[in-house]
Image: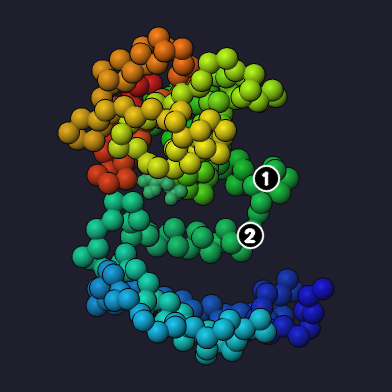
């Protein structure tokens, strides 16, 4: 059991306000360091030179004094990739907005678990509302929705699991009940996480069929139609077409609306 009494006084924010002073000192110290670093990040290159020596000694399970913690934070800043430098260009890992940095802090303080409405009465509803607004922007119809995931790999896995279960009806009996091999069509510029998802879903990586892309790395919808017809003639069952809004290498957007209408 955790011995609260032996922990530093700023380990938690005391619910009765007993350590407001200590808490603010630590928060101020970290915020000062962050603001100072970020405000001078133009002086640090986007990619830090590789550090050949060990950055940290063994991590202490007893905790470390604030001064040492701040020194370690400086090391982290100094040796990390620096997206704040004006010379940094990243179409995927962009410069974070200040409000997103602060939001991370607020949501971590609340630590609501979105597994149920009871555990997350605000964010679970917010998720539905945000996704409805997004789906409307994409013209996906009033009943469209989604789930916020931690990243692209999980989003692809989740979406393909839904497609597999709803189109192939395999939720209870599994893939062995199928007579035709199920296949997914993806653009040849799509991300490798789709192959991983196919593998995890028991479809196998050979179920991922590449569709040609045009010189702008967008899915060629004529090749898509040809491939679907050929696959059906071969006795396979195409059950999902995965379009990408922002391909990994060039940031290209597949003709989403055209695919949705088809
Ligand atoms: C188009 C695309 N999809 C999926 C992913 C996987 O995302 P994550 O690394 O968040 O799992 C990436 C990552 O680069 C990507 O570029």
152 is higher (above) or lower (below) than 259: below
Tag shown at residue 115: 1
- The quarter of the rendered structure image containing the C terminus is top left
> What is the image's colouring?
rainbow
Q: Is residue 164 visible?
A: yes
Quadrant assignment, res 40:
bottom left
Q: Residue furthest top?
A: 233
Crowdedness of circle 1 by 10 Å Cα count: few (<14), some, many (20+)? few
Specify few, some or many for label 2: CA neighbours under 10 Å numbering under 14, 14-19, or 20 or more.
few
Cα separation between marks 2 and 1: 14 Å
Residue at image position (25%, 73%) is: 45
Residue 248 in percent (x, y) is at: 32, 45
- Residue 228 locus on image (x, y percent): 37, 16
Quarter of the picture holding the N terminus: bottom right
Secondary-structure class at tag 1:
loop
Label whose residue precedes the other's in the sequence (2 or 1): 2
**Residue drawn 36% across and 81% down?**
52
The residue that disc 2 covers is 110
Is the CB of mark 2 within 8 Å of ligand 1?
no
Counting from the top left corner in percent of width and height, residue 155 is at 49, 40
Find out if the beta carbon at label 1 lies less than 8 Å from the nearest ligand 1 atom: no
Residue 85's disc number: none
Residue 43 on image: x %, y %: 24, 78
**Residue beneath the point at 70% across and 24% down:** 172
In this rendering, the answer to whether 37 lies above or below 85 is: below
Above or below, 95 against 235 in this view is below
Residue 142 visible in the shown view: no
Residue at the spot 56% in from the left edge and 29% down from the top edge: 162
For marks 2 and 1, give the one nearer the viewer: 1
Q: Is residue 206 left or right of residue 148?
A: left
Callout 2–callout 1 Cβ contact below 8 Å: no
């Amino acid at each position: 059991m955790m011995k609260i009494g032996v922990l530093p006084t700023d380990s938690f924010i005391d619910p009765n306000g007993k350590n407001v002073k200590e808490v603010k000192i630590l928060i101020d110290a970290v915020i000062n360091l962050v603001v100072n670093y970020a405000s001078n990040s133009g002086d640090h290159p986007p990619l830090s030179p590789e550090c050949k020596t060990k950055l940290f000694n063994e991590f202490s399970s007893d905790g470390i004094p604030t001064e040492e913690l701040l020194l370690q934070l400086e090391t982290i800043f100094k040796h990390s990739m620096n997206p704040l430098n004006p010379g940094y260009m990243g179409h995927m890992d962009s410069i974070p907005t200040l409000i997103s940095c602060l939001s991370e802090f607020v949501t971590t303080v609340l630590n609501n678990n979105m597994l149920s409405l009871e555990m997350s009465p605000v964010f679970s509803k917010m998720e539905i509302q945000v996704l409805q607004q997004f789906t409307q922007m994409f013209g996906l119809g009033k009943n469209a929705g989604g789930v916020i995931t931690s990243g692209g790999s999980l989003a692809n896995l989740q979406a393909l699991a839904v497609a597999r279960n709803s189109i192939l009806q395999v939720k209870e009996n599994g893939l062995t009940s199928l007579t035709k091999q199920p296949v997914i069509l993806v653009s040849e510029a799509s991300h490798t996480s789709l192959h991983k998802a196919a593998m995890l879903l028991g479809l196998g990586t050979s179920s991922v069929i590449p569709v040609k892309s045009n010189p702008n790395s967008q899915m060629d919808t004529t090749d898509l139609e040809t491939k679907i017809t050929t696959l059906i003639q071969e006795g396979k069952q195409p059950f999902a077409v995965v379009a990408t809004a922002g391909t990994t290498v060039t940031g290209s957007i597949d003709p989403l609306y055209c695919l949705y209408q088809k």
